[in-house]
C-alpha cells in the first residue's frame, strides 16, 4: 500500500505534468551531458524552454516541422545522444507517425517522445489541438514504452526512467494542473501498475487525470456500499498483465477510465488482457467515437462523462453485470 | 585497413562493373527488388566507399568514421553489393536478398545488416536523420562527415525540404547530400508526375552549396566530392545526373524496371551485356595511361 498525499475531501493541485517534465529535464541536463532536447516551436507550452535557457547549445528548435523533429531526434540518438523531442500530442505521433515508425521504433533509436497537451483538458483550443488518439497510435508501434504519469511526482520518475531506459519511450503529458496523488520517493516501475486502493467488489483501472477521479469515485462507491480497488495504469506499454488479471479474478468486475478515445486506448489494452486471461464484465469510461471541442477543461470533462460520478456509475453497471452473470 | 583506398578511375570503373553484375544477379535470383534505381546509384556509392569516406574495415563502429545514410532505401541491392565489394559484409549473402530470414532485407535494415546506420525505405526520412547525426558529431567536436543519398522522386516529400531548411539554419557543413537524379520515378518521368525543376536553384535558395556533375563519371564525382569537402558554413548537395537502369540496355530509362526484377532470360542477357563492357573499359584505361 502506497503512502498517499491525498485528502478525502479533494485533491490539492500540483504542477501540470508538462511543468514537472520541463523542470526534470533541466535537472537531467545537469547530470548527463548526453541529454539533448528538440521542439517544434512550442517550447513555451511544452516547457522545454527551461532546458533551452539552461543549455542553449543542446537545444534544437526545428520549427513547425514535426516529421523533421522525429527524424532529427533519431539522428541525434544515432550520434550517442539521449534526445527528448516535444510538441503537442496531436502532432507527435499525429503528424510524424511514419517517422516514429521507421526512424525510431523499427530502427530502435533511443528517442524519447514527450508529447504534451494530451486529452480534452487542453480546453479552449478545441478539437484540432486535443489529442484523444495518441495512445492508440503509439500502441501500434512495437518497441515503444508508453508512460502516462498522473502527477508531478510520477512525472519526475517517468522522465528519469525514460532517460535511463534504452529504447524508444512515449510520455503522455497534460496541460492542466494535476491533482497531487503521490508522495515524493514513491517507487514506480515500467510494467507495474500502482494499486492505490484495495477493494473487492470492482476494480477501477485509470490513467492520467482520471486517476484522481477514480479515487474520488472509489470514495463515492464506498458511500453506496461498494468496495472499489483503484489501479494507476501509468505503464500502458508494457502493461502490468498480472495486476489486471488479479483485479479481474479477485473482483470480477472492471472499469477503465481515460482521457482518450475508447478505440485503442488503455481500456482496449485492458480488454485484450481480460478477454484472453480472465473474461469478466468491463465498463469503459472515455471518449466514444467523436472529437473534442472548445470549452473550459472542467466543463469538457463533465460533458464527456470523464468524472468521478461517471466512473462510479460505470462501477455500479459493472457490478450489476457481474451479478446478472451474463457477459452480454 | 582504413578507407578511402583508391582514387584510380580505372579501378573504380572495374569495381562498378562488378557491383552492377551483382545487382542484376541479386534481383534476378530474388525475383523482386529495384534494379533501375540501384543501377543508377552505383558510381555514387562506389565513390563513397572506395574513394571518399573515411572508415576502418576492422572497426566498423570507429567513432570518427564518416557515415552514409541511403535515404532512397529501395536502392538496397546497390548498397549491399558495394558493402560486399568493400569487404564489409560476406559476398555469399548476396544471393539471399529478400529471402525469409536473410540478413539482406528488401530495404536496408540496421539490425540485420552490418554497415547500415538506420533502417530506411519509407522515403523522405534520411536527410533529417543525417542532420541529427551531424548535430551530434558537432557537439562532440568530431570531424566526421555524414553523406546522405536521396532520390528525385523522394524529393517530392516535404520532409526532405524541412531537413534542407534545418541543415542550412544550423550551418551543417558536415552534411553532404547526393541526389541520384535519374529523372524518373514510378509513375513516369519526374516532369510528368511532379516537376522538380529548377531543382539546383531550389537547393541554392534553401541555402545549400550545389555542385552538379555527371553521376556516372568517377572523375566528375571525385572532383565534386573534393569541392564540397572544402565547404565551410553551409551544407552541400551534389546533384548527380544519372540514368535509371544504367549499364543494361533494356533497363536504361525504362520505367518498367523501377521495382521489377529481370526474368532469368533477362538476367542472362544483362550479365552478358555487362561482361561485354569489360574489354572496352580496359582499352580506354590503357589509352588513358
Image (tube, rainbow, N blue to C red):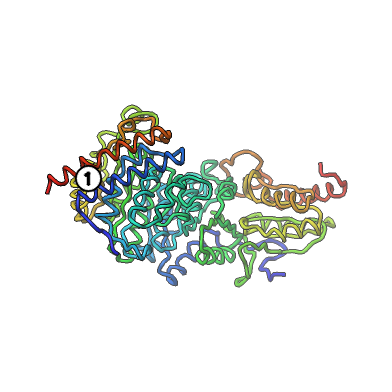
Q: Is residue B124 left or right of residue B220?
A: right
Q: Which residue is at the front of the view, A282 or A287?
A: A282
The image shows residue B74, relative to residue A151, as above or below, that is above
Where does label 1 land, which residue?
B210
Horizontal side, residue A215 vs residue A102: left or right: right
Quadrant showing the N terminus of chain A: bottom right
Foreground of the two, B259 or A272: B259
Q: Quadrant of the C terminus of chain A?
A: top right
Q: Crowdedness of circle 1 by 10 Å Cα count: few (<14), some, many (20+)?
A: many
- Position in image of residue A90 (x %, y %): 51, 46
Give x and y (percent) for residue B215.
24, 42
On the image, the x and y values in percent for residue A266 come to 65, 51
For image coordinates 33% across by 40% down, the residue present is B39
Residue in the foreground of this view, choosing between A227 and B164? B164
Decide which of B69, A317 is in the foreground and name it. B69
Using the rendered image of the protein, determine whether residue B139 is visible from the camera's viewpoint.
yes
Q: Is residue A228 left or right of residue A78?
A: right
Chain letter of mark 1 equals: B
Q: Residue furthest right?
A: A324
Report the number of discs. Answer: 1
Residue furthest top as drawn: B192
Q: Quadrant of residue A158?
A: bottom right
Rendered residue at 82%/44% (across/down): A327
Q: Report whether residue B159 is seen.
A: no
Q: Secondary structure at mark 1?
A: strand
Where in the figure is residue A78, as x and y percent of width and height?
41, 59
> At 39% from the left edge and 42% from the top edge, which residue is drawn?
B25
Amino acid at each position: 500500500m502506497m503512502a498517499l498525499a491525498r485528502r478525502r475531501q479533494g485533491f490539492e493541485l500540483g504542477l501540470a505534468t508538462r511543468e514537472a517534465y520541463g523542470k526534470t529535464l533541466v535537472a537531467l541536463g545537469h547530470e548527463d551531458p548526453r541529454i539533448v532536447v528538440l521542439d517544434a516551436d512550442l517550447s513555451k507550452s511544452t516547457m522545454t524552454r527551461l532546458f533551452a535557457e539552461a543549455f542553449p547549445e543542446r537545444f534544437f528548435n526545428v520549427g513547425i516541422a514535426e516529421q523533421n523533429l522525429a527524424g532529427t531526434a533519431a539522428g541525434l540518438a544515432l550520434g550517442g545522444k539521449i534526445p527528448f523531442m516535444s510538441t503537442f500530442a496531436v502532432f507527435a505521433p499525429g503528424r510524424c507517425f511514419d517517422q516514429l515508425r521507421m526512424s525510431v521504433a523499427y530502427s530502435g533509436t533511443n528517442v524519447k517522445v514527450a508529447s504534451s497537451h494530451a486529452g480534452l483538458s487542453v480546453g479552449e483550443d478545441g478539437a484540432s489541438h486535443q489529442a484523444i488518439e495518441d495512445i492508440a497510435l503509439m500502441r501500434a508501434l512495437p518497441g515503444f514504452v508508453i508512460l502516462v504519469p498522473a502527477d508531478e511526482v510520477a512525472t519526475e520518475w517517468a522522465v528519469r526512467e525514460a532517460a535511463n531506459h534504452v529504447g524508444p519511450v512515449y510520455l503522455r503529458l497534460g496541460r492542466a494542473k494535476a491533482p497531487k496523488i503521490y508522495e515524493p520517493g514513491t517507487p514506480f516501475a515500467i510494467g507495474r501498475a500502482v494499486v492505490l486502493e484495495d477493494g473487492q467488489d470492482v476494480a477501477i483501472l485509470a490513467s492520467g487525470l482520471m486517476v484522481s477521479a477514480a479515487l474520488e469515485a472509489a470514495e463515492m462507491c464506498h458511500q453506496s456500499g461498494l468496495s472499489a480497488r483503484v489501479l494507476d495504469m501509468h505503464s500502458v506499454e508494457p502493461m502490468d498483465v498480472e495486476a489486471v488479471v488479479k483485479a479481474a479474478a479477485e473482483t470480477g468486475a472492471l472499469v477503465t477510465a481515460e482521457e482518450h478515445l475508447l478505440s485503442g486506448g488503455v481500456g482496449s489494452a485492458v480488454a485484450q488482457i481480460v478477454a484472453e486471461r480472465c473474461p469478466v464484465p468491463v465498463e469503459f469510461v472515455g471518449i466514444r467515437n467523436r472529437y473534442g471541442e472548445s470549452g473550459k477543461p472542467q466543463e469538457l470533462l463533465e460533458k464527456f462523462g470523464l468524472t468521478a460520478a461517471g466512473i462510479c456509475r460505470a462501477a455500479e453497471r459493472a457490478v450489476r453485470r457481474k451479478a446478472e452473470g451474463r457477459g452480454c | 585497413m582504413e578507407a578511402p583506398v583508391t582514387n584510380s578511375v580505372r579501378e573504380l570503373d572495374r569495381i562498378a562493373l562488378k557491383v552492377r553484375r551483382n545487382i542484376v544477379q541479386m534481383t534476378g535470383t530474388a525475383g523482386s527488388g529495384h534494379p533501375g534505381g540501384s543501377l543508377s546509384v552505383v558510381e555514387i556509392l562506389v565513390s563513397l566507399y572506395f574513394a571518399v569516406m573515411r572508415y576502418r574495415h576492422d572497426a566498423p563502429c570507429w567513432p570518427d568514421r564518416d557515415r552514409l545514410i541511403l535515404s532512397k532505401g529501395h536502392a538496397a541491392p546497390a548498397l549491399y553489393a558495394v558493402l560486399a565489394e568493400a569487404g564489409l559484409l560476406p559476398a555469399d549473402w548476396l544471393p539471399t536478398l529478400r529471402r525469409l530470414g536473410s540478413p539482406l532485407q528488401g530495404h536496408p535494415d540496421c539490425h540485420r545488416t552490418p554497415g547500415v546506420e538506420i533502417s530506411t525505405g519509407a522515403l523522405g526520412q534520411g536527410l533529417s536523420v543525417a542532420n541529427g547525426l551531424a548535430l551530434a558529431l558537432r557537439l562532440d567536436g568530431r570531424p566526421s562527415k555524414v553523406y546522405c543519398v536521396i532520390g528525385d522522386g523522394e524529393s517530392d516529400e516535404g520532409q526532405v525540404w524541412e531537413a534542407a531548411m534545418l541543415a542550412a539554419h544550423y550551418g551543417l557543413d558536415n552534411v553532404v547530400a547526393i541526389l541520384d537524379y535519374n529523372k524518373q520515378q514510378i509513375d513516369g518521368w519526374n516532369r510528368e508526375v511532379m516537376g522538380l525543376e529548377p531543382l539546383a536553384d531550389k537547393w541554392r535558395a534553401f541555402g545549400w552549396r550545389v555542385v552538379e556533375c555527371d553521376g556516372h563519371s568517377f572523375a566528375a564525382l571525385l572532383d565534386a566530392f573534393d569541392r564540397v569537402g572544402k565547404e565551410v558554413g553551409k551544407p552541400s548537395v551534389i546533384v548527380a545526373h544519372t540514368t535509371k537502369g544504367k549499364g543494361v540496355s533494356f533497363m536504361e530509362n525504362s520505367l518498367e524496371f523501377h521495382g521489377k526484377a529481370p526474368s532469368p532470360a533477362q538476367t542472362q542477357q544483362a550479365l552478358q551485356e555487362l561482361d561485354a563492357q569489360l574489354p572496352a573499359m580496359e582499352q580506354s584505361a590503357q589509352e588513358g595511361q
